[in-house]
Image: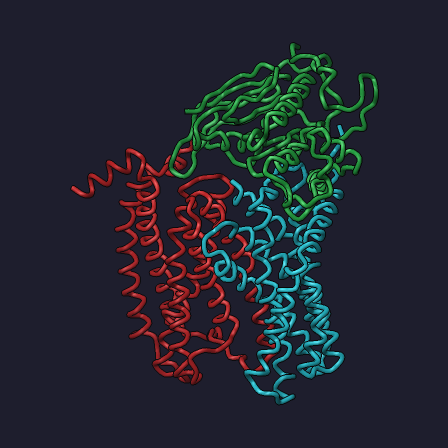
Chain colours: A green, B cyan, C red
């Protein structure tokens, strides 16, 4: 089963080298395209239709992603990028069509599907009164996977905000807040990434870090769908879908 | 594959909400302050005769506690809804009803328990005898969680809706009638020299029903609000 | 896609003309049975020994209370169907029933008060039935207010459906709690329901009036749902064609 590229050694994630046991965080063991047994796409969308209010945003939207593939959704504001991501995350229901994960409709999988996905919406989902470390650990605990302090700090470090770990989030700049939110990606362990405008407020270096994280994720056989106005500086090739 | 731990999610969310309440020390005091002020207004409006005050105390104290609990409901989900945390909770592989249960538990600990603890002090203002005060505290202990549970449904339904606060009151106050009747009735019974057990048991039944069904209904309402 | 014939009418486009044909049928039934019921109630039924002529208002009061309860359950049923099966027409039907249900509740409260005055000397008594009717009135108003306050019609349908289901489960509980409350405070132990020793004509009159109110409710709900359909589906071709045809 052809997957993506081999995970490159210089990425920020994961911390341990090949052959070492990674303390498993999240639902999946280390996966790679070489031990993948699936012969159908991991994520596939079948003729999705989305209606918001009275407007039909898109119809007959289909795509299939194999392990290691990434879909970049483009389009002007209001074209339905966020709506598509929300449908994939299970937050919204499509008017027609269905989303399948490893061949099974997502509605049937329920929690099994949600355990595999990592949602980074446009809203940061950070509590202003808590510190980045507290935020990350709370987010992870609420997701059912309690996180140790060390793991939280190393994830924040991967995004370059470890030194801010004890300050309340309200004291951070927009870019720093976005990086704290993206530290969830550095925790890994999930096969599907859904990212809505992840580059907002990021400077060039942080964007590159995000690109490297994405590359590592795809290289290990994960899939990603991202909506972005700007191109993500990742080396992996991306499939592009433009919404009207 | 590691399964997500529902217990860890519940504990994590309660811990997070308690931490947030501790950081913003003012919010829990609003409900308590409202309770105290309203309970103090009635004697001023009605006159200080001890007999009258003792008669109206169960109803007045219960209505004041009920209104105080209702006022604090607006913020139950609204803050999380606004900063995207509610979305993150909905996407988590943990049943949303469990998350709602956790939020309601934290909300009750922060706003309900102070009401229960303050009630004996206010009951003294109304000249209630000791056994009646004990029943009042017990009825509020059983009843305030019911108010939080049922109120969570209203809070979830009115997320981000115009006229939220008043609409929330309109939706939730009719549903508050059973706990009010049983709670105030328990204290009334004790004042009349009758056992309060029947009323308190009915209140307990309300709590069991609310704890079982309200998180499911509120979770459905949250999903509807997030769509 | 089910191919059962009656699911055809779940489509707004086919339901609209069907409803249009049914409205006059039910309206006529309502008018005729209403006339019969009122005649029975006001002329045929015997004068009550204790209450004189004033009791005759129960021929409106009791059917109105029954309808208000029944309609709340029918409304919750359609709202629930719309929530579970994601069908638009079911939710519209629930919205069409709500104002009629609220009207009957209001009517029941007023006729109860008008009955109470000559009979018990007071306009309002806190008996279980009247108090539950009042709470039911608030539930209807809450349902309509919630649906009106939410901008997105589908979200409004779903949220008000949850409210309707929660309300319908709660009404018996509230009724029971108010009855309990009544027995605690023995002062207000009057009941506005007659003892079962009712003359046959009285019962017949109430049943006929109930039937009349039911026919009226169906006629009004069907007519209202047509208006809601046109409003909600205004962007579709069939609705525009209908609007043009009716304007001509």
Q: Could you tell me which residue is drawn at 66 percent across and 65 percent down?
A: B143
In the displayed structure, would residue B103 be above or below residue B133? above
Question: In the image, C150: left or right of C167?
Answer: left
Which quarter shows the C terminus of chain C? top left
Which quarter shows the N terminus of chain C? top left
Residue C146 image offset from top left, x and y in percent: 45, 54
Q: Is residue A7 among what the camera can see? A: yes
In the displayed structure, would residue A90 be above or below residue B140? above
Q: Could you tell me which residue is drawn at 45 percent across and 47 percent down?
A: C156
In the displayed structure, would residue C223 be above or below residue A109? below
Residue C23 image offset from top left, x and y in percent: 28, 50
- Res. A85 image quadrant: top right
- Res. C43 image quadrant: bottom left
Q: Could you tell me which residue is drawn at 75 percent across and 79 percent down?
A: B131
Q: Nearer the viewer, residue A97 or B222?
A: B222
Residue B208 image offset from top left, x and y in percent: 68, 58
Q: Residue furthest top?
A: A2
Q: Is residue B207 among what the camera can see? A: no
Q: Could you tell me which residue is drawn at 65 percent across and 88 percent down?
A: B50
Task: Report the number of numbered marks.
Answer: 0
Residue A143 image offset from top left, x and y in percent: 69, 38
């Amino acid at each position: 089963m052809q997957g993506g590229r081999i995970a490159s050694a210089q990425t920020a994630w994961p911390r341990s080298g090949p052959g070492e046991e990674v303390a498993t965080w999240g639902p999946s063991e280390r996966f790679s395209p070489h031990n993948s047994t699936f012969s159908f796409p991991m994520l596939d969308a079948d003729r999705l239709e989305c209606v918001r209010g009275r407007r039909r945003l898109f119809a007959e939207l289909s795509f299939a992603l194999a392990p290691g593939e990434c879909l970049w959704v483009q389009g002007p504001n209001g074209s339905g990028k966020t709506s598509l991501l929300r449908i994939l995350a299970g937050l919204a229901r499509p008017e027609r069509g269905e989303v399948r994960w490893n061949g099974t409709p997502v509605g049937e999988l329920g929690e099994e599907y949600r355990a595999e996905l990592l949602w980074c919406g446009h809203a940061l989902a950070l509590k202003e009164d808590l510190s980045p470390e507290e935020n990350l650990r709370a987010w992870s605990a609420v997701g059912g996977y309690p996180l140790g302090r060390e793991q939280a700090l190393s994830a924040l470090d991967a995004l370059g905000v470890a030194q801010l770990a004890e300050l309340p989030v309200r004291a951070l700049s927009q870019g720093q807040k976005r990086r704290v939110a993206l530290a969830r990606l550095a925790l890994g362990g999930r096969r599907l990434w859904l990212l809505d405008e992840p580059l907002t407020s990021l400077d060039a270096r942080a964007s590159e870090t995000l690109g490297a994280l994405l590359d590592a994720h795809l290289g290990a056989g994960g899939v990603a769908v991202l909506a972005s106005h700007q191109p993500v500086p990742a080396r992996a090739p991306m499939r592009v879908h433009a919404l009207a | 594959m590691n399964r997500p731990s529902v217990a860890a999610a519940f504990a994590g969310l309660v811990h997070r909400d308690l931490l947030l309440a501790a950081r913003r020390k003012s919010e829990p005091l609003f409900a308590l302050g409202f309770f105290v002020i309203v309970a103090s207004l009635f004697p001023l409006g009605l006159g200080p005769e001890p007999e009258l005050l003792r008669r109206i105390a169960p109803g007045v104290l219960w209505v004041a506690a009920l209104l105080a609990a209702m006022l604090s409901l607006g913020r139950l989900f609204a803050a999380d809804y606004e900063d995207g945390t509610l979305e993150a909770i909905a996407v988590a592989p943990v049943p949303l009803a469990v998350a709602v249960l956790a939020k309601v538990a934290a909300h009750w600990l922060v706003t309900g328990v102070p009401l229960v603890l303050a009630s004996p002090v206010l009951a003294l203002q109304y000249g209630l005898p000791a056994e009646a005060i004990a029943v009042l505290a017990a009825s509020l202990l059983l009843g305030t969680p019911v108010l939080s549970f049922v109120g969570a449904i209203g809070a979830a339904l009115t997320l981000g809706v115009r006229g939220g606060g008043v609409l929330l009151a309109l939706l939730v106050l009719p549903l508050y009638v059973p706990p009010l009747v049983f709670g105030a009735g328990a204290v009334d019974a004790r004042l009349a020299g009758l056992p309060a057990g029947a009323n308190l048991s009915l209140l307990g039944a309300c709590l069991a029903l609310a704890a079982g069904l309200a998180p499911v209904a509120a979770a459905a309402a949250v999903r509807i609000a997030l769509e | 896609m089910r191919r059962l014939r009656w699911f055809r009418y779940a489509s707004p486009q086919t339901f609209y003309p069907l409803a249009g044909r049914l409205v006059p049928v039910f309206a006529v039934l309502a008018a005729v049975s209403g006339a019969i019921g009122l005649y029975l109630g006001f002329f045929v039924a015997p004068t009550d020994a204790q209450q004189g002529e004033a009791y005759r208002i129960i021929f409106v009061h009791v059917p109105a209370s029954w309808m208000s309860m029944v309609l709340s359950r029918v409304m919750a049923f359609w709202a629930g169907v719309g929530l579970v099966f994601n069908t638009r027409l079911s939710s519209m039907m629930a919205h069409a029933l709500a104002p009629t249900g609220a009207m009957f509740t209001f009517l029941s409260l007023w006729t109860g008060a008008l009955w109470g005055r000559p009979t018990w000397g007071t306009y309002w008594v806190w008996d279980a039935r009247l108090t539950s009717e009042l709470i039911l009135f608030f539930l209807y108003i809450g349902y309509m207010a919630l649906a009106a306050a939410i901008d997105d019609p589908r979200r409004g349908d779903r949220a008000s459906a949850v409210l309707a289901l929660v309300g319908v489960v709660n009404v018996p509980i509230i009724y029971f709690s108010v009855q309990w409350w009544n027995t605690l405070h023995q002062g207000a132990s009057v009941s506005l329901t007659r003892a079962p020793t009712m003359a046959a004509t009285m019962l017949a009159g109430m049943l006929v009036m109930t039937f009349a109110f039911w026919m009226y409710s169906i006629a009004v709900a069907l007519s209202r749902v047509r208006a809601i359909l046109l409003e909600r589906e205004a962007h579709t071709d069939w609705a525009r064609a209908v609007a043009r045809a009716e304007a001509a």
